[in-house]
Image: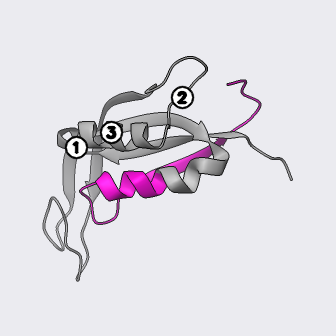
Amino acid sequence: MMEFSYCKLEIFVPESHLEAIQRALQAVDAGHIGRYDCCMSYHPVTGCWRPLEGAAPYLGSVGEISAEPELKVEVTCPAERAAETVAAVKAAHPYEEPVVNVIPLWQIGI
């Protein structure tokens, strides 16, 4: 099995919470690349979802499909700190079920 030293997180968040996510990432030193820290990128996307019965959506209504503008935030972190980084993001995120994708990065020289 191949080991990965670093991973990339993709985080989907409403623009109103970008700064909270940035602070959470900084607190766990995600986005630290060489002699730089706080490195991340983000761009606008449209998220779609339908809250099911029992959900408590931040946006939208139970049973109705929602489509809202969001930001896709991308940041690199050491694989050994991925769980800690995801936990920090979830603590700062407004969604009941935030989407955070963790993708292993192969042979990067950070």
Secondary structure under the numbered disc 3 in the rendered image: helix
Circle 3: residue type: Arg
Find the magenta span and give its range. 86-110
Residue bearing mark 1: 17
The residue depicted at 24 percent of the width and 70 percent of the height is: 51
Q: Is residue 52 above or below residue 21?
A: below
**Which residue is more in the foreground, 8 or 79?**
79
Task: Examine the rendering and report whether any part of residue 70 can be seen.
Answer: no
Outermost residue on the top side: it is 35
User: Quadrant of residue 71 in the image?
Assistant: top left
Front label number (1 vs 2): 2
**Which residue is more in the foreground, 23 or 69?**
23
Mark 3 or mark 1: name the one nearer the start of the chain.
1
Residue bearing mark 3: 23
Real-space CA distance between mark 3 and mark 2, rounded to the nearest whole angstrom: 13 Å
Circle 1: residue type: His
Secondary structure under the numbered disc 2 in the rendered image: loop
Residue 23 forms part of the magenta stretch: no
Where, quadrant-wise, is the C terminus in this rendering?
top right
Real-space CA distance between mark 3 and mark 1, rounded to the nearest whole angstrom: 10 Å
Residue bearing mark 2: 32
The residue depicted at 65 percent of the width and 46 percent of the height is: 79
Real-space CA distance between mark 1 and mark 2, rounded to the nearest whole angstrom: 21 Å
The residue depicted at 40 percent of the width and 45 percent of the height is: 11
User: Quadrant of residue 65 in the image?
Assistant: bottom left
Residue 103 in the image: x percent, y percent? 60, 45
Q: Is residue 94 left or right of residue 40?
A: left
